[in-house]
Image (cartoon, rainbow, N blue to C red):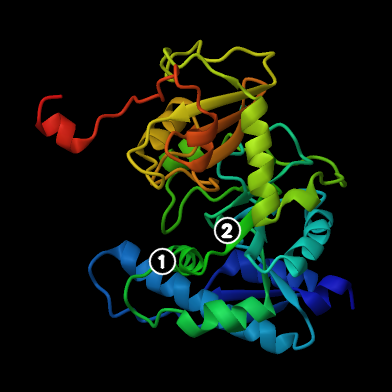
């Protein structure tokens, strides 16, 4: 047998004829579950959420049982394609995951990995937000963290929201790349439609080569990564905070390392960061994704850019007093009071 016939399994809830055909063509093990009979009838999306969450749980139970001697599993949906270095990328991150007890996973996906904002295929970030879309899970963390608290069907609870809540409560972070190792091709689904795909997925970029030597792996721990952020922010040139980030001429090329400070009422608030993300054509649907302690690292017009909250420890330490943090979205109470 080929290696993938021994170590790859496809699981499906209900019928997916194209997926079944691929499994048969390559001789890959296929496990089919009956579609979940959701008891939640609020909306179709909730019913879909029940079905997907149940399928995830069943799939992981089956995979661990199939491979009782394996330490990790890769988890992917069938609407993802992978980069040539997909396995090589993860093989370089496994030692980091093993040594850092504050990490939950490594993901192949950068929510902000668009053509204008992702440039360095050797760069790895740390985030307190779980990205998903091609990720690595250890048996240990499955048994200790995820499996015991997996929500029972059928409450309309999306599996990824559940994961994010659990990891946030445990203080567990995820590693992810500047340039994604997966590309989302699905245009229709429980949470995706054609217009949404065009706005948030189509322009993502995918790593092209079969090997990149990942950099800074010794600086991804919670303390060392925080120190790295402090070093970068201290050396970065502040953008012009009198300009509107939505202006098409905001930030020019050739500056290399820039910092933008956004307004906060407290260190956990990211409303202004979300508005700025929209201006910069980054992910801005529900919340800013990819942050670590109120800081987002990305690229913009060829420059490395740090987006830093004014009330974070980094903002308090490094934001010059003469610079007003950028504030482009009003708060509801200000609107109600005519401010």
Q: 99 and 248: which one is in front?
A: 99
Compared with 276, 179 (above or below) is below
Please state the horizontal and vertical placement of residue 40, each as a whole percent of the image. 27, 75
Along the line of sight, which residue is nearer the eye, 93 or 5? 93
Kindly state the secondary structure of the residue where label 2 is placed.
loop
Q: Is residue 88 above or below residue 157?
A: above
Of the 4 image quadrants, the one containing the C terminus is top left
Q: Which residue is mark 1?
A: 158
Image spot of residue 296 (x, y percent): 55, 39
Q: Is residue 211 above or below residue 65?
A: above
State which quadrant residue 259 falls in.
top right
Category of crowding for the residue at label 1, using alpha-carbon neighbours closer than 10 angstroms: few (below 14), some (14–19), many (at least 20): some
Could you tell whether 265 is left or right of 322 in the image?
Answer: left
What residue is at 55 percent from the left and 15 percent from the top? 251
Q: With 146 as the anchor, is 323 left or right in this view? A: left
Q: Residue furthest left?
A: 337
- x, y percent for residue 189: 45, 56
98 relative position to 57: left or right: right
Separation of disc 1 and disc 2 at Cα? 13 Å
In the image, residue 21 sits, relative to residue 315, either above or below, namely below
Q: Residue at x 51, y 26 (%)?
A: 260
Numbered disc 1: secondary structure:
loop
Q: Residues within 10 Å of mark 2 (few under 14, many from 20)?
A: many
Give the position of the N terminus as an image quadrant: bottom right
Query: Which residue is label 2 attached to?
Result: 132
The residue drawn where x is 22% and y is 68% is: 42
From this viewpoint, is residue 272 visible? yes
Report the side of 179 relative to 314 (left or right).
Answer: right
């Amino acid at each position: 047998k080929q290696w993938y016939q021994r170590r790859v399994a496809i699981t499906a809830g209900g019928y997916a004829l194209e997926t079944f055909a691929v499994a048969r063509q390559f001789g890959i093990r296929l496990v089919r579950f009956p579609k979940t009979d959701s008891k939640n009838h609020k909306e179709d999306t909730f019913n879909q959420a029940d079905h997907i969450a149940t399928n995830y749980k069943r799939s992981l139970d089956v995979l661990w049982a199939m491979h009782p001697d394996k330490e990790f599993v890769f988890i992917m949906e069938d609407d993802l394609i992978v980069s040539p270095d997909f396995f090589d990328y993860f093989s370089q991150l496994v030692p980091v995951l093993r040594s850092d007890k504050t990490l939950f996973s490594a993901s192949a996906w950068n929510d902000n990995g668009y053509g204008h904002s992702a440039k360095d295929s050797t760069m790895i970030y740390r985030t307190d937000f779980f990205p998903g879309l091609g990720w690595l899970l250890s048996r240990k963390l499955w048994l200790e963290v995820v499996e015991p608290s997996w929500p029972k069907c059928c409450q309309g609870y999306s599996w990824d929201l559940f994961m994010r809540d659990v990891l946030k409560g445990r203080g567990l972070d995820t590693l992810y790349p500047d340039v994604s190792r997966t590309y989302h091709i699905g245009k229709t689904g429980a949470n995706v439609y054609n217009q949404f795909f065009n706005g948030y997925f189509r322009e993502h970029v995918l790593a092209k080569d079969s090997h990149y030597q990942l950099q800074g792996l010794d600086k991804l721990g919670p303390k060392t990564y925080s120190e790295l952020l402090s070093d970068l922010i201290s050396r970065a040139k502040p953008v012009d905070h009198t300009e509107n980030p939505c202006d098409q001429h905001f930030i020019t090329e050739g500056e290399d390392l820039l910092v933008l400070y956004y307004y906060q009422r407290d260190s956990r608030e990211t409303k202004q960061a979300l508005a700025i993300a929209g201006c910069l054509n980054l992910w801005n649907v529900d919340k800013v994704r990819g942050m670590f302690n109120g800081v987002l690292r990305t690229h913009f017009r060829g420059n490395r850019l740090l987006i830093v909250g004014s009330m974070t420890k980094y903002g308090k330490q490094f934001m010059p007093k003469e610079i007003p943090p950028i504030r482009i979205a009003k708060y509801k109470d200000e609107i109600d009071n005519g401010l």
